[in-house]
Image: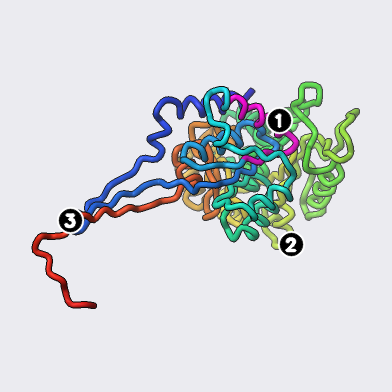
Amino acid sequence: MGEVKVTADFLKNFGGDNVRFLARSFGVPGDHYGQFSHGHRWPYGPVAIVAPFNFPLEIPVLQLMGALFMGNKPVLKPAEKCALVMEQFLHLLHDAGMPKEDVDLLNCQGPVAERLILDADVRLTQFTGSSRVAEMLLEKTKGKVKIEDAGFDWKILGPDVDHVDYVAWQCDQDAYACAGQKCSAQSILFAHENWVGAGLFDKMKANAATRNLEDLSIAPVLTHTTQSILDHANRLLEIPGSKLLFGGKELANHKIPEVYGAVEPTAVFVPLNEMLKDENFDVCTTEIFGPFQVVTTFNDNEMCHVIEACERMSHHLTAAVVSNDVDFQSAILAHTVNGTTYAGRRARTTGAPQNHWFGPAGDARGAGIGTPEAIKMVWSCHREIIMDTVVPSDWVQPKAT
């Protein structure tokens, strides 16, 4: 029900007259009498939305409504695995009074949507999904795409250890809720060595062991097979000093088809110095869209190496700095760029609600979602209209230049 609540809260936030204020313009006096400049947020017109399978309601609704709020004509392509959700939502909008011609729904596979985007006059496509498809769309549309693609999301636990049970629980939720199939899932954990002595890893292992298919606290992985996930774990375990903290096995007594993944919540420890080596870094920062994370530790003298690792990663979506040490917080935040970064003892990587920006930073192609700033940035462009109306009564034609 989390998606339903976030979506409902988003719609409440923009209820009444709030949509009109999204397009608030501004005025600047000109440099002579009778001139005035007006800055406007201007719609693109025909736009496309390509939405993912893992949030079949929240992501397409928030992006669709943002596109409509700013005056665009969207065609919506939800994931074909779950297009029925948005089909029914559009029926709800029609029942609430939205004209049927305001939105087109395209229930199809990727190649069909690609032809529409390339052959029709689509001026902007907002894409949420894999980096591979995002890069392909960017190339074929000559950059006319706003992307929210991969998220190899990091969490850093600072030297000030406290509330260990809470932090262990949040680490488990961030990495393994929804079977890790969220772009904001915790992909890598940098834990200060003080947390090891406090028993954090043991508590994380105990929490992970409670997950099971019966209550869907673990679930099938839709984009990786069991074998591909286990092969990735084995590749990491070939790195000197690496070890399996927990998981690394196929789920017992399951009936999940081989085309999907069925693995226990898994954590692989890789020493920080080995992770940073060129021959290891790419495999250590490869996103597995499932219940899988890499874990490492650092000491006070290695914080610069943690920052190096974070900034060498190719995508900068969500992050967490779990510390109430202001100096530590400031050092990490000043040297990193992730677009949605939580800081403090309760910092997390997942669960971004509707009341703050969610999206990457450090990438001119990045798309946000949920807030007025995100909607204006993604779904409108800036247009300046300069009014210049008064010809002076004493005007004399000047010499040509």
Q: Earlier in the sequence, mark 3 or mark 1?
A: 1
Residue type at mark 1: give it.
Leu
* Mark 3 burial class by Cα count in 10 Å: few <14, some 14-19, many 20+: few
Which label sits in the foreground, 3 or 1?
A: 3
Position of 95 relative to 290 (above/below) = above
Position of 328 relative to 217 (above/below) = below
| SS under mark 2 | helix
Residue at the image position 32 percent from the left and 52 percent from the top: 385
Q: Is residue 388 magenta?
A: no
In the foreground, 42 or 127: 42
Residue at the image position 46 percent from the left and 46 percent from the top: 43
Residue type at mark 3: give it.
Val
User: Taken as a whole, is the magenta stretch helix, strand or loop?
Assistant: helix
Q: Earlier in the sequence, mark 2 or mark 3?
A: 2
Q: Which residue is mark 3?
A: 390
Residue type at mark 2: give it.
Glu
Residue 30 lies in what quarter of the image? bottom left
| SS under mark 1 | helix
Q: Which residue is mark 1?
A: 84
Residue at the image position 55 percent from the left and 53 percent from the top: 365
Residue at the image position 57 percent from the left and 42 percent from the top: 74
Residue 369, given in percent of the width and then of the height, sits at: 53, 39
In the foreground, 96 or 7: 96
Pick the quarter of the image with the C terminus. Answer: bottom left
Q: Earlier in the sequence, mark 2 or mark 1?
A: 1
Q: Are marks 3 and 1 in contact (CB under 8 Å)?
A: no
Pick the quarter of the image with the N terminus. Answer: top right
Q: Which residue is mark 2?
A: 279
Residue 140, given in percent of the width and then of the height, sits at: 65, 59
Q: Which residues are magenta?
A: 76-93
